[in-house]
């Protein structure tokens, strides 16, 4: 299956109010803000979007609202992965019926699964959503179960609507191997901010990233420099991006992204428990660091 996506895809934050309720209107406003800043799509209900802290009903409503708000301007790649196959199929089919452009499916976690079990899971989801593009989502740091290059390439070649990969595993060597051996039309989105430049040079189609909620220009500058063949400028842009990643604690706490976005003029609400908000001292130190870096 051929599915075209190229460029920047922020892993969309989910705004919550003080009581932990999803603020759907703020999520749509954030998506609209990002669409105006030049992104190619959004990836809602993922790790950064606190998707695993959302109910199935909340995830469905959020995708419905986002597709209605920006689905004609940019691609909405709905994260539909869960701990079990039936719920993943439910969310994936809903995303297809709602009008999302594609779905991203993280490997089921908590238990350890071998490749046979993981293959059955992904094939079942792809079969249930026949004709709908599915992205494998490789994040063993959270999901526990890693998708090896051999596994990824096997599904890419053997299952028609497994159309791409979002790779956040942290191995540029494995990513490069997939890029070198992928079948025609199989899209690869890098999910590790710290080697955005290297992934793009290796042939990645774009990036799915948390930091782009706050500072999409850092990624777009890397992409533009690489496209122009100005590798010296691209390296400088990557260096600035790496500095920003350090300030955002490499995604250890979603609250840093939300506070960064707030400091840049957009209120994304609160995190959902058991995530925690930043302390007053953390906020002061973070604001000072962002100001020193030129991000605010």
Image (cartoon, helix red, strand yellow):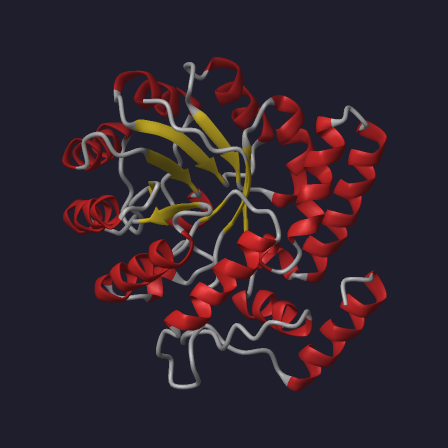
Determine which quarter of the picture holds residue 45.
bottom left
Residue 127 can be seen, yes or no: yes
Q: Residue 53 appears at what percent x and percent y?
A: 34, 66
| Labels in figure, total | 0
Q: Position of residue 193 (x, y in %)?
A: 62, 44
> Where is 55 relative to 273, above or below?
above
Q: Residue at x 29, y 45 (%)?
A: 108
Q: Residue at x 56, y 46 (%)?
A: 39
Q: Name above or below for residue 291 compared with residue 129.
A: below
Residue 238, relative to residue 162: is it above or below?
below
Residue drawn at 34 percent across, 57 percent down: 68
- Residue 40's x, y, as percent? 52, 42
Which of the two residues, 167 or 45, is positioned nearer the viewer here?
A: 45
Quadrant where the N terminus sits is top left
- Note whether residue 210 is visible: no
Q: Quadrant of the C terminus?
A: bottom right
Left-right relation of 94 to 249? left
Percent of width and height locating residue 20: 38, 80
78 horizontally vs 256: left or right:
left
In the depicted view, which residue is nearer to us: 169 or 100? 100
């Amino acid at each position: 299956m051929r599915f075209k996506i190229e460029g920047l895809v922020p892993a969309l934050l989910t705004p919550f109010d003080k009581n932990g309720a999803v603020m759907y209107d703020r999520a749509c406003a954030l998506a609209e803000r990002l669409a105006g800043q030049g992104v190619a799509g959004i990836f809602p209900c993922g790790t950064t979007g606190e998707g695993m802290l959302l109910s199935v009903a909340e995830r469905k409503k959020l995708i419905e609202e986002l597709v209605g708000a920006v689905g004609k301007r940019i691609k909405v790649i709905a994260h539909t992965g869960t701990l079990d196959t039936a719920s993943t199929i439910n969310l994936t089919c809903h995303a297809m019926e709602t009008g999302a452009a594609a779905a991203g499916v993280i490997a089921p976690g908590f238990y350890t699964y071998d490749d046979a079990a993981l293959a059955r899971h992904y094939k079942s989801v792809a079969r249930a959503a026949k004709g709908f593009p599915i992205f494998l989502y490789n994040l063993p740091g959270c999901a526990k179960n890693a998708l090896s290059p051999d596994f990824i390439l096997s599904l890419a070649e053997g299952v028609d609507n497994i159309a791409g990969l979002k790779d956040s595993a942290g191995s540029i060597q494995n990513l490069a191997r997939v890029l070198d051996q992928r079948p025609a039309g199989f899209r690869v989105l890098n999910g590790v901010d710290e080697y955005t430049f290297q992934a793009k040079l290796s042939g990645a189609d774009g990036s799915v990233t948390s930091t782009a909620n706050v500072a999409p220009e850092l990624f777009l500058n890397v992409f533009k420099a690489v496209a122009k063949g100005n590798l010296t400028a691209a390296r400088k842009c990557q260096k600035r991006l790496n500095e920003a990643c350090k300030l955002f604690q490499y995604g250890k706490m979603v609250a840093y992204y939300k506070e960064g976005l707030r400091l840049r003029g957009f209120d994304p609400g609160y995190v959902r428990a058991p995530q925690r908000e930043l302390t007053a001292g953390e906020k002061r130190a973070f604001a000072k660091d962002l100001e020193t870096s030129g991000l605010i």
